[in-house]
């Protein structure tokens, strides 16, 4: 099926063809006709599936030829969780809409608000925004949402994770009742369903990737290693295999800075992006990485959200994420739109419980491979994991060395799985790794997750005060 056969007009087909797309991805094949019909849509699509074009193309077509927006008014509003994603969605709008006479703008925090107020004063057809800055603009009277015809919530699950539900509700209250609503989410957890129920009117539901699955084309591997040898192992892998465009995830901002420095000392050009970096520094790092000047980009989870690089070949989990869903989000950075990719995780003894939870979540065991010269010490004891940078002292609610707590108490219990944590895989026995055997025994308390990072998914939706405080911290912290 071609883009034209999906019902798209010639100027849009011409733009995507020039951009190099020869045929629609599965989410596009389903979403484009559904949105063109004008009804609401609930779409389950992981990042990398081509979902942005899936809503942008039909949105542009529906807006095309309509009345110009009045001053300060917008006709279509796209909400995204991060600044980077907002910028990328707007780039797509500009690229795909290049042969149409529609205007678009992007607004997000961290930069001067005045130029944004200025641009909005004339009115825009499409506004892409992060929720916080959008509310600021509304409160300053710079924006009127009463004529919005189409609303898109992109990566809605992540917006809820980041504690944006209250902001979203305030935005929704300013919209006219009659409009088209499109909700995109990588996962359909209960809180997304609750949001969808309150927002969408008889939506068409489409889902392209198996729920909570990892993208099939991504090769996944675990390299067991001692905690203090991780940076040497990473430098070795990058150098040995001539890896370029490696996206590396660390747990903390401080860890990201330190690793970028260590890689630099090993002759690997690397920069860090995280919430403490200015927007200008983040943009520069990203553009150098995209252009191939930087060999490695080291990022925290939230900063990395929205990074879209065509066919990103390597993702490295330098630290395992402590929320299993984040593993899927992270490795979704590679293998984009049908390309193949590799996701490698460096796992030390402290992270066995995290690994067990991830494997349960994705319902598969990830092959282990010990790299010669980096064999982990089989007698090493797990230590508590520091989940945040702590420059001025402890910032978490939970005690750093508090009583050992099972990971299952810090978030909803993982779904039951056929995967057997702790069972040796062929590659594991080859390597003799102890991952999954010692501290990773199901049900056995571990210090590894003695501190919980985020509010349980949906806690913000439920309005639990402690959870909201934690969510706010997350928003202002690791972004
Ligand atoms: P997304 O899931 O929207 O973040 O898109 C992932 C990547 O796929 C982006 O780099 C797009 O440029 C690319 N992409 C989107 N649609 C297509 C298509 N039909 N053919 C090839 N690449 C695509």
Image (cartoon, grey):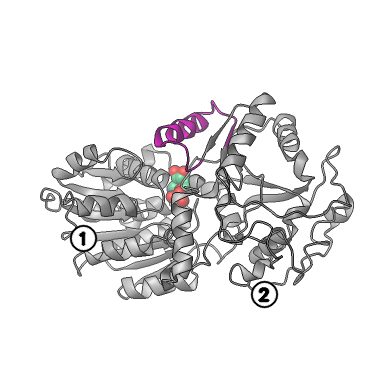
Figure check: 391 above or below 51? above
Q: How many neighbours does mark 1 have within 10 angstroms: few (below 14), some (14-19), or many (20 or more)?
A: many
Residue occupying the point 62% across, 72% down:
413
Tell me the element at label 1.
loop
Residues drawn in magenta? 274-297
Residue occupying the point 55% across, 67% down:
211
Task: State the mark number for residue 298.
Answer: none
Do we see residue 168 in this rendering?
yes
Q: Earlier in the sequence, mark 1 or mark 2?
A: 1
Where residue 216 sits, quadrant-wise, is: bottom right
Give the residue number, with chain letter if any, for mark 1: 149
Do we see residue 22 in this rendering?
no
Residue occupying the point 68% across, 64% down:
357
| Horizontal side of residue 89 vs 98, given as left or right | right
| Horizontal side of residue 206 vs 212, given as left or right | left
- Depth check, front residue: 60 or 230: 230
Asked whether 382 falls inside the magenta stretch, the response is no
Residue 432: percent from the left, percent from the top?
89, 52
Give the residue number, with chain letter if any, for mark 2: 416
């Amino acid at each position: 099926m071609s883009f034209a056969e999906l019902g798209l007009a010639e100027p849009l087909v011409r733009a995507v063809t020039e951009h190099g797309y020869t045929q629609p991805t599965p989410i596009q094949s389903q979403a484009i006709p559904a949105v063109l019909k004008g009804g609401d849509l609930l779409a389950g699509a992981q990042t990398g599936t081509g979902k942005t074009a899936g809503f942008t193309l039909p949105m542009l077509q529906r807006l095309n030829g309509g009345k110009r927006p009045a001053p300060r008014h917008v006709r279509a509003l796209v909400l995204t969780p991060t600044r980077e994603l907002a910028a990328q969605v707007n780039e797509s709008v500009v690229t795909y809409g290049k042969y149409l006479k529609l205007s678009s703008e992007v607004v997000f925090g961290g930069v001067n608000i005045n130029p944004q107020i200025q641009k909005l004063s004339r009115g825009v057809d499409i506004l892409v925004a992060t929720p916080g800055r959008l509310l600021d603009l509304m409160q300053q009277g710079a924006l009127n949402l009463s004529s919005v015809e189409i609303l898109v919530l992109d990566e809605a699950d992540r917006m809820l994770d980041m504690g944006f539900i209250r902001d979203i509700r305030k935005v929704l209250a300013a919209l006219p009742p009659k409009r088209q609503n499109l909700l995109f989410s990588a996962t359909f957890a209960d809180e997304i369903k609750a949001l969808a129920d309150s927002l969408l009117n008889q939506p068409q539901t489409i889902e392209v990737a198996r729920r909570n699955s990892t993208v099939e084309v991504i090769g996944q591997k675990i390299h067991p290693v001692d905690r203090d040898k991780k940076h040497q192992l990473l430098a070795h892998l990058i150098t040995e295999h001539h890896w370029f465009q490696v996206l590396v995830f660390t747990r903390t901002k401080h860890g990201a800075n330190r690793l970028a420095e260590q890689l630099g000392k090993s002759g690997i050009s690397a920069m860090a992006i995280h919430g403490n970096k200015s927007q200008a520094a983040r943009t520069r790092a990203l553009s150098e990485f995209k252009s191939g000047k930087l060999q490695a980009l080291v990022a925290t989870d939230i900063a990395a959200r929205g990074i879209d690089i065509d066919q990103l070949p390597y993702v490295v989990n330098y630290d395992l994420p402590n929320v299993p869903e984040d593993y899927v989000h992270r490795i979704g950075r590679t293998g984009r739109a049908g390309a193949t990719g590799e996701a490698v995780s460096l796992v030390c003894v402290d992270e066995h419980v995290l690994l067990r939870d991830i494997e349960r979540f994705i319902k598969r065991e990830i092959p282990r491979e010990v790299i010669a010269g980096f064999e982990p010490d089989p007698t090493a004891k797990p230590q508590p994991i520091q989940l945040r940078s702590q420059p001025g002292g402890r910032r978490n609610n939970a005690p750093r060395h508090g009583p050992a707590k099972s990971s299952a108490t810090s978030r909803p219990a993982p779904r039951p799985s056929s995967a057997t944590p702790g069972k040796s895989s062929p590659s594991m026995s080859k390597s003799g790794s102890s991952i999954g055997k010692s501290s990773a025994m199901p049900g056995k308390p571990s210090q590894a997750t003695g501190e919980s990072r985020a509010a349980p998914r949906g806690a913000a939706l439920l309005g639990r005060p402690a959870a909201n405080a934690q969510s706010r911290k997350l928003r202002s912290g690791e972004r």
